[in-house]
């Protein structure tokens, strides 16, 4: 690690002020950031820890019925506190990493990082969530802009994520054998006005919506509706753990399984 | 009722109290006043010419004590190799220099170029970033078969080839083997890869060098399985320090699995630098450093042919193996693909003719050396995979084919055609036991239940034999070992009867502190709590060879038995004197010495007190005191053997394999602590399952390690393995050591990979998907790709 200053503000306003400093960086649970600091791959001058900001922690139901999760809420808290409000989301959170990771890592950190194999981006995109920051609200469809890239401006803080609650949903993650991130993961969410299917882990462009499957499932929310559909391997990731063709194949299998599991 | 003490009792491990409560004392826990820290600047290219290493700016950085480069080690020796293999033509293997810090060239990613010693580790890292390097990248040698073609780039220019040796065994049998294969009724051929593994002990390597200017004494604390071996190799071959001025301590060690046997450059560096800087110097490997500097394991590419006659009797085996040595010869690297592999190619079978060819190859990768099982897993995997394939080709039951070819109980001692002679065994017994504990009778029912879920269920069975309890020194000397492989023990009885055993074996998870006292307790009839085990410190323990090759109880335990026998002989003399009886009439029972046929007795404590307070003592016959040392050199290897069964479920849609059941029936000879033995088998199977399904170190064509962290190197976790059924009740005691024990540390890792892979192939083939072989790790993507290919 290189040396840095550390601040732990109590309010969002203080945090925003601290983030305005040169080369300041937000610290959520540190599950991604601390290892990269240790490896000397990042060198912020100030780390702004968000964990002490009460308004950024917790799960609640918004006026419009959506499930609202504070940007500094840990995966462990979501797994527990969203279990009744949005079971598929809670289950996704419960499947991230291991207990230590879940008790530290946060939804804001996960969405800000936008790892192409992370779980949360698929939930946010499939739910048509709104990412609330200290300056604005961003629709999930506009937020994810390719692997490790988001619509966030420098210094912008994810303060809350609002998930419209679907009638039925499920997330199926096929684990990469080593990291246990998603080799491919599919989140299917059925709303009154249609079905959304988001895929993580598979594409070089990061999380994406599988529009063909959405159209078919919006007409008929059943595994049968997917018969004959297959995702294209173009632009999918090939690495040690699977080829593009394998990932494209998994997209089809996991989407079907998610539909079957949706509750 | 099961025994609650002595041999055969499942006593809980006393060392676990400190391990599980954070009270262990590992090398990283050792901090010496004024110690400095070293950071190694390592090569990030696989192969390159070192044009410049400029440390001038870095040397002026805050906190820097001194920066060392290869030039600082020009006057000392290189890291030695402990085993010399002689090739097919009678020539010694090629043995290139292995400098402590790179000289002239870097040869693998991770090769240390410079070492910065500073007040803090962060200061050392800062300074390392300021070192100016000019490395001219050279083509990387990665693929073994390409490496031995003419025109390949050379890892070591001075030896003119990448071929370390071309070994034939038994060379005299080659023509007969070729002939037998030509005339066979059936030949099954299989090409396979034994995947490269990284041992990944929980504790990474650490060393602390210390030096006393006052006495000119050196001390090295290090994460080692064999501190005396390190003292000998480093003292004699690298730094020129005699044993009496060099102390090596290996305190609590958090797992070794072979990778902590070897003498590493970092150990020599810390010892050397402590004197050069006149300050203790500490190094703790990061996990990333461990991946690119711990010796890796396995990495064989093999073609095996099994010949059978018309009645399905095995008539010959012929193999050709390319074995990766990596960039330098690690301490025992040359022995692994040769003497630890070729000599086991008979397996459990009566194959009369065997020829093994091994080409050991240098590549621009981390050195490869022994890893749990070392050579024997590679042998077992080949044999048990090819036998399974033969059974499928011939349409016969794989268990029946094995039984038909077993060495039978009345054939011991059995001289194999590959030098070793098995002293004892009973392979039908362990196979019968396996069939029972694995509930093979219930398999078809379970298969149907899997099918109802859309899953393919497969059953894989295999046998294994290994040679351990290494080793007879005179024999290994002939085979090229540059060390003896005896073991030592000193049994020190204190005045009030407590005992301290100084053993040359080293415990890094094996439970010696619990099991060794059980043996003495059995011999003397005293409580285990009166016995303490000391190990891992060359200043306390007589010259010992350490722990690997499942040798601790078979060799180290035997030395302890011999020393305890001497204690008993002397104690009986003292007891006889105290009771005015003759030595021959003294019997030991329940911790007392009795005069046979009388009610006269003295307690153990009376005798030990007399030895140290010799007021009434036969001083004219024997010396005071009660302390004995013994060195034990075994007369043969021991040959644990057994049969393993694995049941998998395979999802044909995704290729994912899960292990549903795993059973192991082992013959380890006599068992001292069944619970510890079961634990060793469990751990070994977990590593074997890891190799079979998950693990694999992969280099790209440029020699970059693609699996340099746990993000890409897949380690098995508790959820990846089932509850095991293990049994070690089939006992044929070893015939040549005093305890009749064989060793159990490696069996699980040796016996399990073929069971897993055989099960996967059974699931596929019995499910109508015809596939001959899938290389390890049998990952979901590989299984899926194989299915696609089979369907195409
Ligand atoms: C062993 C392990 C296993 C894991 N497994 C999984 C898995 O299966 N699935 C999965 O999805 N993830 C997994 N993760 C990642 C984990 O979910 C992390 O928690 C997450 O990626 C980052 O969250 P964090 O709160 O730790 O963020 P940090 O590491 O603190 O920060 C990550 C990045 O986000 C920025 N940041 C943090 N919070 C905010 C905010 N509120 N607003 C704006 N920017 C912010 C930081 O500046 C930094 O750039 C795993 C991690 C580990 C270590």
Image (tube, coloured by chain):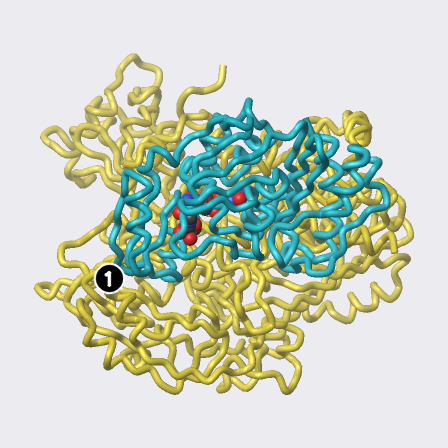
Chain colours: A cyan, B yellow
Which residue lies most toward the top here? B599
Residue B539 position within the rendered picture, expressed as x and y whole percent measured from the top left: 23, 53
| Direction from residue B228 to residue B416 in the image, left or right | right
Seen from the viewer's position, the closer of residues B532 and B525 is B532
Seen from the viewer's position, the closer of residues B481 and B172 is B481
Task: Tell me the chain of label 1.
Answer: B
- Secondary structure at badge 1 equals strand
| Direction from residue B157 to residue B344 in the image, left or right | right
- Would you place residue B518 above or below residue B488 in this image? above
Residue B8 position within the rendered picture, expressed as x and y whole percent measured from the top left: 47, 27
Respond yes or no on whether mark 1 lies under 8 Å from ligand 1.
no
Whether residue B726 appears in this view of the structure is no
Residue B238 position within the rendered picture, expressed as x and y whole percent measured from the top left: 32, 72
Location of residue B508 (image quadrant):
top left
| Direction from residue B301 to residue B9 in the image, left or right | left
Seen from the viewer's position, the closer of residues B12 and A30 is A30
Q: At x 54% / y 59%, what residue is drawn?
A: B707
Q: Quadrant of the C terminus of chain B?
A: bottom right
Location of residue B524 (image quadrant):
top left
- Would you place residue B703 above or below residue B661 in this image? below
Q: At x 73% / y 47%, what residue is drawn?
A: A211
Whether residue A103 appears in this view of the structure is yes
Mark 1 — residue? Answer: B37
Residue B525 position within the rendered picture, expressed as x and y whole percent measured from the top left: 34, 24
């Amino acid at each position: 690690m290189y040396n840095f200053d550390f601040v732990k503000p109590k309010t969002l306003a203080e945090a925003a002020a601290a983030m305005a400093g040169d080369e300041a960086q937000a610290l959520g649970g540190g599950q991604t950031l601390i290892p990269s600091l240790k490896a000397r791959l990042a060198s912020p001058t100030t780390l702004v820890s968000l964990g002490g900001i009460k308004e950024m922690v917790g799960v609640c139901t918004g006026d419009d019925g959506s499930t609202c999760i504070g940007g500094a809420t840990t995966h462990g808290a979501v797994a527990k506190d969203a279990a009744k409000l949005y079971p598929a989301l809670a289950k996704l959170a419960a499947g991230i990493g291991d207990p230590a990771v879940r008790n530290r890592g946060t939804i804001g950190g996960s969405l800000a990082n936008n790892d192409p194999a992370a779980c949360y981006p698929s939930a946010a995109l499939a739910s048509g969530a709104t990412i609330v920051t200290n300056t604005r609200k961003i629709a999930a469809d506009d937020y994810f802009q390719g692997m490790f890239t988001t619509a966030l401006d420098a210094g912008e803080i994810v303060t809350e994520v609002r998930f419209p609650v679907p009638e039925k949903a499920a997330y199926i993650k096929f684990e990469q054998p080593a990291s246990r991130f998603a080799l491919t993961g599919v989140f299917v969410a059925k709303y009154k006005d249609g079905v959304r299917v988001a895929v993580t882990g598979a594409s070089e462009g990061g999380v994406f919506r599988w529009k063909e499957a959405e159209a078919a499932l919006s007409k008929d929310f059943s595994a049968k509706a997917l018969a004959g559909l297959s995702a294209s391997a173009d632009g999918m990731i090939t690495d040690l753990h699977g080829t593009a063709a394998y990932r494209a194949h998994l997209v089809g299998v996991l989407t079907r399984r998610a539909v079957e599991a949706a509750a | 009722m099961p025994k609650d003490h002595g041999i055969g009792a499942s006593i809980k491990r006393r060392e676990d109290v400190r391990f599980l409560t954070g009270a262990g004392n590992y090398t990283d826990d050792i901090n010496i006043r004024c110690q400095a820290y070293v950071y190694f600047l390592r090569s990030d290219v696989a192969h390159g010419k070192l044009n410049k290493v400029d440390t001038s700016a870095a040397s002026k950085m805050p906190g820097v004590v001194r920066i060392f480069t290869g030039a600082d080690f020009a006057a000392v020796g290189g890291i030695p190799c402990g085993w010399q293999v002689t090739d097919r033509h009678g020539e010694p293997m090629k043995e290139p220099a292995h400098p402590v810090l790179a000289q002239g060239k870097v040869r693998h990613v991770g090769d240390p170029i410079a070492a910065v010693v500073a007040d803090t580790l962060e200061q050392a890292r800062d300074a390392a970033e300021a070192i100016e390097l000019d490395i001219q990248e050279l083509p990387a040698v990665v693929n073994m078969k390409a490496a031995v073609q003419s025109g390949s780039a050379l890892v070591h220019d001075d030896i003119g080839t990448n071929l370390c040796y071309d070994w034939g065994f038994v060379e005299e049998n080659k023509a007969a083997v070729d002939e037998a294969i030509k005339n066979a009724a059936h030949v099954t051929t299989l090409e396979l890869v034994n995947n490269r593994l990284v041992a990944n002990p929980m504790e990474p390597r650490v060393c602390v060098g210390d030096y006393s200017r006052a006495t000119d004494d050196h001390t090295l604390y290090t994460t080692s399985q064999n501190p005396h071996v390190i003292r000998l190799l480093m003292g004699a071959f690298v730094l020129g320090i005699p044993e009496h001025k060099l102390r090596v301590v290996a305190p609590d060690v958090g797992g070794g699995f072979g990778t902590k046997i070897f003498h590493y450059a970092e150990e020599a560096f810390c010892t050397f630098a402590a004197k050069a800087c006149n300050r203790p110097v500490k190094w703790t490997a990061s996990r990333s450093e461990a991946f690119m500097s711990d010796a890796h394991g396995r990495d064989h590419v093999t073609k095996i042919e099994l010949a059978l006659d018309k009645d399905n009797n095995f008539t010959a085996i012929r193999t050709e193996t390319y074995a990766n040595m990596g960039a330098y010869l690690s301490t025992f690297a040359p022995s692994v693909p040769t003497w630890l592999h070729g000599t086991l190619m008979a397996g459990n079978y009566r194959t009369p003719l065997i020829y093994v060819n091994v080409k050991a190859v240098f590549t621009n990768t981390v050195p490869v050396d022994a890893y749990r099982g070392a050579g024997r897993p590679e042998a077992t995997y080949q044999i048990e995979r090819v036998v399974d394939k033969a059974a499928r080709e011939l349409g016969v039951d794989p268990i029946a084919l094995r039984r038909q070819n077993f060495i039978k109980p009345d054939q011991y001692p059995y001289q194999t055609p590959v030098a070793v002679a098995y002293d004892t065994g009973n392979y039908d017994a362990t196979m019968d036991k396996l069939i029972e504990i694995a509930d093979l009778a219930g398999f078809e029912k379970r298969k149907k239940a899997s099918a109802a879920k859309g899953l393919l269920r497969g059953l894989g069975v295999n046998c294994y034999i290994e040679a351990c309890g290494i080793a007879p020194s005179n024999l290994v000397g002939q085979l090229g070992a540059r060390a003896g492989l005896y073991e030592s023990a000193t049994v020190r009885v204190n005045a009030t009867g407590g005992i301290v055993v100084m053993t040359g074996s080293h415990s890094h998870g094996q439970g010696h502190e619990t099991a060794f006292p059980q043996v003495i307790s059995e011999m003397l009839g005293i409580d285990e709590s009166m016995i303490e085990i000391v190990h891992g410190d060359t200043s306390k323990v007589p010259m010992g060879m350490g722990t690997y090759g499942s040798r601790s109880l078979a060799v180290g335990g035997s030395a302890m038995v011999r020393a305890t026998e001497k204690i008993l002989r002397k104690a009986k003399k003292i007891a006889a004197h105290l009771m005015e009886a003759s030595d021959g009439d003294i019997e030991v029972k329940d911790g007392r010495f009795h005069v046979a046929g009388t009610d006269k007795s003295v307690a153990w404590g009376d005798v030990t007190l007399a030895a140290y307070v010799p007021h009434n003592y036969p001083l004219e016959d024997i010396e005071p005191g009660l302390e004995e040392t013994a060195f034990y050199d075994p007369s043969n290897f021991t040959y644990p053997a057994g049969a393993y069964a694995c049941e998998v479920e395979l999802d044909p849609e995704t290729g994912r394999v899960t292990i549903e059941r795993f059973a192991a029936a082992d013959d380890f000879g006599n068992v001292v602590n069944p619970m510890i033995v079961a634990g060793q088998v469990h751990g070994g199977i977990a590593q074997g399952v890891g190799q079979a399904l998950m693990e694999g170190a992969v280099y790209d064509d440029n020699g970059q390690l693609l699996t340099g962290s746990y993000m890409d190197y897949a380690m098995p976790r508790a959820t990846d393995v089932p509850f095991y059924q293990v049994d070690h009740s089939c006992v044929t005691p070893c015939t040549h050591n005093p305890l009749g024990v064989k060793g159990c540390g490696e069996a699980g890792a040796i016996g399990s990979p073929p069971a897993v892979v055989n099960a996967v192939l059974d699931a596929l083939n019995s499910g109508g998907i015809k596939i001959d072989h899938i290389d390890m790790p049998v990952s979901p993507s590989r299984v899926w790709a194989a299915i696609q290919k089979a369907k195409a």
